Image (spheres, coloured by chain):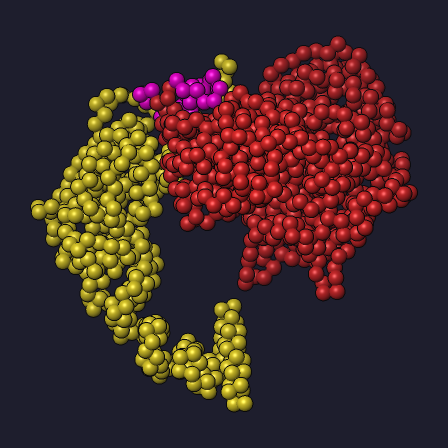
């Protein structure tokens, strides 16, 4: 059965359709074309023609002309619109003209760069010219590194390598820096929040070195559809940026299905688990051999789902390779193997975290299942875009979880289809991030007294601070690096803490082997001692977690449960930045917070039924986060009217509502902010609700929330009032057992008072 | 943003470090220089540093005539080990031979702005020598110097084309016996140099930073002393090594002879290698040396000589699996005597099956390979008989 037949079948399947809240069919669109540019190198034209490309999409042609005009620009187009030609054509033709010219390509992940390089190789091979293109990342062998530094025309790498390896050792890359003509950055929409703020600073460092070596590279940036691509591009590069938005690529018909699992407990507002529903839908697609990608939310989910589907396809010989898991923790060789399988069709289903969301060219996928709402509109379109990359019909089924945000989206499809995708916010001048990169930059090249780092007008104050601490030496109008260690080593672009943990399988005592790695932030949740860790659908138990050496030792086990850790959070107010009083008497404050998190226990769940079967203790140190937050302080005039228990239920309810609403208004992912409450806040002793940025130093979300707090409260009230549940459910104030019988009513009453 | 500095100060609650001394600007930018002279009697006779010996040691071409005056011995002291653009060589020492003795010239910068001047002086010095000799300079000192030249915009610095890095051959020759091949250990074990009150290398960067902060020059004298001794030891070790390679019969330790032989074999010096293997066989490493010699003979096509070597091994040690395996291979592939090959393979398998042997993975793999060979030989044999 092909996908069109399957769609027909699904539409008549009553039990399926009962759960569908929206079936949106987006019609196919025509392509818009322009002839190959006249000023393009004849050799390049020939290669394009020989590959059946006789015309360019309009946006590709526009990019070529902008590049020729030496403009910095960003291309904003959806998946599968021939984006790579937008940068490869100008870069390759520049190198054809001038063989000294160099280009630097930045991709957010290694997998993506591997994919892009193989495409570029083919083009260069067809050209028959000696344009050396290399990937330079953690997997590159030592000997090859030297060759790349000397001779690579196009160096393909990622921001982390640029930050930790290339920039600090720039004197080994003289050829590249002296002749750098293009900096190509793909998928810039992924550089939001902390990662984006870091990248903006890495680029400031890069441009500073380019100036030292006398080059002035041009930027070519690519972005998926987000609300503010130009603003983001300008913040990242510090330059004025032109936008190319006229997508000329045709698209096939696209079916977007919103699927809400049936309610199993109406009082508690509990629905059937998303994993179970995905299993059911996925089996149907597998049976019909429709190439499918399943996007799960976490590594854990990937493993649970992979395991299930592998069982479904196990053949007489025990082979299960038609279904593969794919996530960040896999080793490079494993990932390459899966990518190959996808391309040559040996693999029918891939279960992935968002690692595959980015533009890896898979080609033949037809259907896409999303386990829950991916968190942002932009991300959802990106993931859905993985299916049907050619002009054929594509099917996307989004299965909602009972998470409140999912429920809001699934029940308000118009919000999803009409709202603009999110803003990508970055805060390059976040104090922590900026200071770190000024350090790195000072290591790379002594600062002049009057020099400005990017557009940071207070650069001299940072330099003065660093010399006060004997990190820099201020002498004769310059600031020199005065420490032994290389500063970039301790700064990770992707999370607050630095080193990754390696995961070591000690099942065979004579032969320990490393099977993966994990960032420090996630380790307490997934690799605490006695956790069940899954890797490629095999189960391991964590025997020992060594925090000092950053190693986790695991042993293969055969159990029928998995584990999930509980996170504890506590808050301290460090400083008030702004304050005002609301008409109702409540206080509103914007300030700095220290948030301490600790994992103290974990739960065991049965694999098939997901019921709780036990608990365990975790002994790990707490992690501190210094960030920006905003909070509402209830005045006595209001809080006096509630008993202690009631106010607790009300606060919890409002906190739950705010965490549903805020991501929609702040246009961020739910995990970017946290909302917590305290019945007696420190210092004031008053009931307080806090909302804070989940990143060190903050990324601007709380400031925005401070300004639009009324809107947030209004929308929260609207959801609570509009929800059909009686005493609370996960989609509004939270389930009855958490908020209590009065919880929903009290939350509504308190919200009304706050808005008074 | 007036309170930015305060905010920055709040970031780390760590107690404030002592602020730097107010800098008394040394406007003349003259870097510290010194010269010391050492008597030639400290060094092994130079006559062993011939072209053939040097090429055998370093595996790269050397000019036909190498005079002691042609070589510059160089060592740097740096502000860190990372070798990135922010690491500097604040002190550079260079030694060379003159008619009156071994001269060590040392340069040290009082502060960062003097770096360019020092680099120009070192560049001028390097210009006078065709050969450079260092200890681990290939991966550390020279890339770092190149980086410093780059940072100070000194283009076309004169780094000698021929670079003899003593670390690699030293490791090849002495690692087996001495384990630790750091310069300080080599000089102690081989040259019997005793350093008094030496500054550990790990403390060098901090010592220099401390000087920048407090201006007290005395601790730097220790760094200069350390660097000077490193350069003298380097030159001594260079000539000592040449002599050992030239006259292996003077070497006492069997491990050194064996390692030297192996290193000669690697650089393609067959006759020198065989000579050293013979010597090491005579002084206590018979089994390993015979095995290696048999390997060379076989490669050279002297199968009979190889057989003899293996058999002499078996005479010494009836339980030598390696000898049996070597014989089995020879009889199978070169001498085409399948029954003998089978018999030696069986003997090797029997030796490995002794329960006393700890069944580790290497033994298991060895067994597997032998069993595979055994099966193949049986197949070949039965084909031959039919």
In the picture as drawn, the residue positioned furthest to the top comes out as A583
* Vertical arrangement, residue A498 with respect to residue B305, above or below: above
Q: Is residue A173 visible?
A: yes
> Residue, x 79% and y 37% (percent of image)?
A255
Image quadrant occupied by the C terminus of chain A? top right
> Residue, x 76% and y 37% (percent of image)?
A253
In the picture as drawn, the residue positioned furthest to the left comes out as B100
Q: Nearer the viewer, residue A193 or A629?
A: A193
State the image coordinates of residue B166 (x, y, percent, origin top left): 27, 53
Q: Nearer the viewer, residue A202 or B214?
A: A202
Q: Is residue A187 visible?
A: no
Taking A44 as reference, is A254 left or right?
right
> Residue, x 78% and y 26% (percent of image)?
A415
Q: Nearer the viewer, residue A708 or A603?
A: A708
State the image coordinates of residue A185 (x, y, percent, origin top left): 54, 33
Kindly indicate which chain is depicted in red in the rendered structure.
A
Q: Colour of chain B?
A: yellow
* Vertical arrangement, residue A442 with respect to residue A110, above or below: above
> Residue, x 67% and y 11% (percent of image)?
A580
Taking B125 as reference, is B338 left or right?
right
Instruction: Tell me if residue B71 is in the magenta stretch.
Output: no
Which residues fall within the magenta stretch? Answer: A450-477
Taking A714 as reference, is B181 left or right?
left
Taking A233 as reference, is B283 left or right?
left
Instruction: Tell me if residue A460 is in the magenta stretch.
Output: yes
Q: Nearer the viewer, residue A599 or A176?
A: A176
State the image coordinates of residue A593 (x, y, percent, origin top left): 61, 24
Q: Residue A661, located in which quarter of the rendered image?
A: top right
State the image coordinates of residue A679 (x, y, percent, origin top left): 74, 24
* Vertical arrangement, residue A675 with respect to residue B353, above or below: above
């Amino acid at each position: 059965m092909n996908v069109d037949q399957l769609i027909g079948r699904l539409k008549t399947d009553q039990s399926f359709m009962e759960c569908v809240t929206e079936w949106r069919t987006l019609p196919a669109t025509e392509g818009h074309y322009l002839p190959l540019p006249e000023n393009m190198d004849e050799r390049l034209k020939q290669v394009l023609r020989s590959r059946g490309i006789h015309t360019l999409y309009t946006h590709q042609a526009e990019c070529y002309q902008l590049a020729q005009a030496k403009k910095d620009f960003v291309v904003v187009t959806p998946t599968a619109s021939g984006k790579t030609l937008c940068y490869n054509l100008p870069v390759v033709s520049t190198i054809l003209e001038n063989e000294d010219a160099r280009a630097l390509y930045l991709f957010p992940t290694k997998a993506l760069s591997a994919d892009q390089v193989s495409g570029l190789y083919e083009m260069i091979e067809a050209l028959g010219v000696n344009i050396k293109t290399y990937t330079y990342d953690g997997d590159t062998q030592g000997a090859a590194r030297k060759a790349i530094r000397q001779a690579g025309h196009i160096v393909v790498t990622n921001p982390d390598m640029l930050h930790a390896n290339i920039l600090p050792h720039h004197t080994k890359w003289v050829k590249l820096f002296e002749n750098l003509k293009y900096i190509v950055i793909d998928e810039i929409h992924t550089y939001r929040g902390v990662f984006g703020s870091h990248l903006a600073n890495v680029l400031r460092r890069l441009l500073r070195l380019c100036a030292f070596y006398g080059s002035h590279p041009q930027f070519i940036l690519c972005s998926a559809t987000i609300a503010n691509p130009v603003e983001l591009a300008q913040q990242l590069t510090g330059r004025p940026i032109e936008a190319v938005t006229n997508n000329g690529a045709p698209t096939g018909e696209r079916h977007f299905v919103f699927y809400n699992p049936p309610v199993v407990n109406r009082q508690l507002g509990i629905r059937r688990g998303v994993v179970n529903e995905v299993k059911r839908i996925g089996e149907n697609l597998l049976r019909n051999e429709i190439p499918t990608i399943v996007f799960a939310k976490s590594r854990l989910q990937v493993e649970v789902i992979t395991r299930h589907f592998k069982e479904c396809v196990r053949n007489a010989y025990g082979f299960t390779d038609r279904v593969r898991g794919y996530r960040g923790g896999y080793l490079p060789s494993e990932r390459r193997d899966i990518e190959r399988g996808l391309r040559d069709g040996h693999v029918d289903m891939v279960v992935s975290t968002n690692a595959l969301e980015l533009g890896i060219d898979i080609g033949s996928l037809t259907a896409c299942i999303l386990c829950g709402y991916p968190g942002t509109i932009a991300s959802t379109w990106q993931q859905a875009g993985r299916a049907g990359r050619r002009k054929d019909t594509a099917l996307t089924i989004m299965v909602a979880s009972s998470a409140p945000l999912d429920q809001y989206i699934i029940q308000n499809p118009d919000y999803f289809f009409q709202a603009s995708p999110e803003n990508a916010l970055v805060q390059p001048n976040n104090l922590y991030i900026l200071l770190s990169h000024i350090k790195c930059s000072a290591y790379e090249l002594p600062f002049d007294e009057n020099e400005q780092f990017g557009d940071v007008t207070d650069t001299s104050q940072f330099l003065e601070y660093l010399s006060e601490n004997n990190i820099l030496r201020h002498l004769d109008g310059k600031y020199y690096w005065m420490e032994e260690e290389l500063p970039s080593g301790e700064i990770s672009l992707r999370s607050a803490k630095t080193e990754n943990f390696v995961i070591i399988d000690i099942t065979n005592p004579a032969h320990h082997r490393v099977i993966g790695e994990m960032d420090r932030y996630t380790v307490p949740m997934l690799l605490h001692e006695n956790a069940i860790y899954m890797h490629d659908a095999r189960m391991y138990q964590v025997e020992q977690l060594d925090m000092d050496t950053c190693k986790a030792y695991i042993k293969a086990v055969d159990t029928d449960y998995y584990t999930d850790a509980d996170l504890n959070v506590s808050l301290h107010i460090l400083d008030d930045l702004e304050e005002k009083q609301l008409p109702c008497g409540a206080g509103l404050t914007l300030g700095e917070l220290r948030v301490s998190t600790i994992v103290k226990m974990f739960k065991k769940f049965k694999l098939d039924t997901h019921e709780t079967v036990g608990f365990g203790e975790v002994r790990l140190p707490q992690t501190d986060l210094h960030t920006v937050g905003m909070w509402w302080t209830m005045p006595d005039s209001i809080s006096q009217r509630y008993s202690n228990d009631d106010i607790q239920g009300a606060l919890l309810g409002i906190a739950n509502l705010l965490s549903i609403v805020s991501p929609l208004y702040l246009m961020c992912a739910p995990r970017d902010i946290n909302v917590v409450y305290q019945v007696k806040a420190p210092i004031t002793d008053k009931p307080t609700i806090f909302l804070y940025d989940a990143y060190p130093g903050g990324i601007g979300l709380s400031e925005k929330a401070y300004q639009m707090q009324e809107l947030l409260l209004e929308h929260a009230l609207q959801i609570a009032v509009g929800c059909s549940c009686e005493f609370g459910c996960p989609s509004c104030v939270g389930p009855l057992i958490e908020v209590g019988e009065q919880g929903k009513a009290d939350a509504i009453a308190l919200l009304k008072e706050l808005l008074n | 943003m007036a309170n930015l500095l305060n905010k920055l100060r709040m970031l780390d609650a760590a107690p404030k470090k002592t602020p730097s001394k107010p800098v008394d600007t040394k406007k003349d930018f003259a870097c510290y220089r010194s010269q010391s002279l050492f008597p030639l009697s400290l060094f092994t006779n130079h006559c062993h540093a011939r072209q053939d010996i040097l090429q055998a040691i370093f595996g790269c071409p050397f000019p036909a005539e190498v005079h002691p005056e042609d070589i510059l011995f160089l060592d740097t002291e740096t502000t860190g080990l990372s070798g990135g653009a922010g690491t500097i060589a604040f002190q550079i020492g260079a030694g060379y031979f003159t008619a009156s003795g071994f001269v060590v010239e040392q340069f040290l910068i009082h502060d960062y702005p003097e770096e360019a001047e020092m680099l120009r002086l070192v560049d001028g010095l390097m210009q006078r020598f065709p050969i450079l000799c260092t200890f681990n300079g290939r991966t550390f000192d020279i890339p770092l110097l190149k980086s410093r030249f780059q940072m100070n915009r000194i283009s076309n610095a004169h780094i000698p084309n021929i670079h003899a890095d003593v670390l690699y051959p030293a490791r090849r020759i002495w690692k087996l016996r001495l384990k630790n091949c750091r310069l300080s250990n080599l000089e102690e074990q081989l040259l019997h140099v005793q350093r008094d009150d030496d500054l550990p290398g790990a403390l060098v960067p901090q010592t220099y930073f401390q000087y920048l902060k407090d201006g007290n020059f005395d601790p730097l004298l220790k760094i200069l002393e350390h660097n000077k001794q490193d350069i003298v030891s380097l030159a001594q070790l260079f000539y000592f090594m040449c002599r050992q390679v030239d006259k292996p019969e003077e070497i006492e330790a069997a491990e050194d002879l064996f390692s030297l032989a192996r290193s000669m074999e690697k650089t393609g010096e067959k006759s020198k290698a065989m000579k050293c293997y013979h010597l090491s066989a005579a002084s206590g490493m018979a089994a390993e040396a015979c095995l290696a010699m048999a390997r060379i003979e076989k490669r050279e096509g002297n199968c009979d000589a190889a057989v003899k070597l293996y058999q002499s091994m078996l005479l010494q040690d009836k339980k030598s699996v390696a000898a049996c395996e070597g014989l089995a291979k020879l009889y199978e592939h070169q001498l085409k005597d399948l029954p003998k090959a089978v018999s030696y393979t069986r003997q090797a398998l029997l030796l490995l099956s002794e329960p006393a042997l700890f069944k580790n993975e290497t033994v298991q793999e060895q067994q597997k390979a032998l069993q595979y060979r055994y099966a193949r030989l049986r197949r070949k044999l039965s084909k031959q008989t039919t």
